[in-house]
Image (tube, helix red, strand yellow):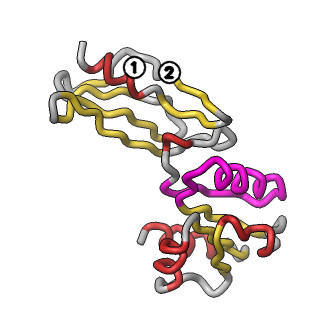
Amino acid sequence: IFNTKVANALSGSNKRVVVLCADSSTLEEMSSQSLPKNSILALIKDAASVGVGKGDVVVSCQPADSKSWMTSAQLGATNAPVVVLNGFQYNGYKAFEMAYYLKPMTFNSGICGYCVRQFPYDWVVWSVKTAQPLDYTVAFVEAQGCLRPDLQRVSLQLTK
């Protein structure tokens, strides 16, 4: 699974890799994978008991609710880098900048384009009809500390 590959890649830095999962099913799945020897696996809600420190790197897997996002962000305050994987974009916590994002946009049950982000470049709306990016700046919606692309406006641009 992708989360395990990232944890293994980060373990080469000789830092302890703290892998935090949002739910017990992800935790169970991750525990059956080949994680690096210098890793710790726990639930996000139990992060305080793990003792994340300056020499660690944190992988936060699938934070879905605001509390999980806030916990992940607070771990970054310990000077430990935090990598969020598979975070549900509709709850994207604004303390984290999305690095890679691909959202297919549909109209009449067919894909009409994509909302794309490839760090360090700007967000792009790609039209299937013209096979080119649109001249459009992606707007964002904020609610309760969460920030996400305004997919409704993106959809309107693609269906003009």
Residue at numbered disc 2: 139
Sequence order check: which comes first, mark 1 or mark 2? 2
In which image quadrant can residue 1 be found? bottom left
* Residue 86 at x, y percent in the picture: 48, 55
Q: Does residue 121 appear in this view? A: yes
In which image quadrant can residue 22 be found? bottom right
Q: Is 56 above or below relative to 131?
A: below
Residue 88 among magenta residues: no
Q: Kindly check if marks 1 and 2 are in contact, taking CB atoms under 8 A apart as contact.
A: yes
In which image quadrant can residue 58 be found? bottom right
* Residue that appears at 46% across and 40% down: 118
* Residue 65 at x, y percent in the picture: 59, 50
157 sits left or right of 42 in the view: left
Separation of marks 1 and 2 at Cα, in angstroms: 8 Å
Give the amino acid type for the residue marked by disc 2 in the picture: Ala
* Residue that appears at 52% across and 52% down: 87
* Residue that appears at 27% across and 20% down: 158
Residue at numbered disc 1: 153
Q: Please report the bounds of the magenta region as a residue range.
A: 62-86
Q: Residues within 10 Å of mark 1 (few under 14, many from 20)?
A: few
Q: Where does the C terminus fall, quadrant-wise? A: top left
26 sits left or right of 74 in the view: left
* Residue 120 at x, y percent in the picture: 54, 38
* Residue that appears at 54% across and 74% down: 24
Q: Is 151 above or below relative to 45?
A: above
* Residue 46 at x, y percent in the picture: 72, 70
In this view of the protein, which residue sits in the foreground, 20 or 3? 20
In this view of the protein, which residue sits in the foreground, 153 or 1? 153
> Which mark identifies residue 143?
none
Q: How crowded is mark 2: few (under 14 residues within 10 Å), some or many (20 or more)?
A: few
In this view of the protein, which residue sits in the foreground, 116 or 42? 42
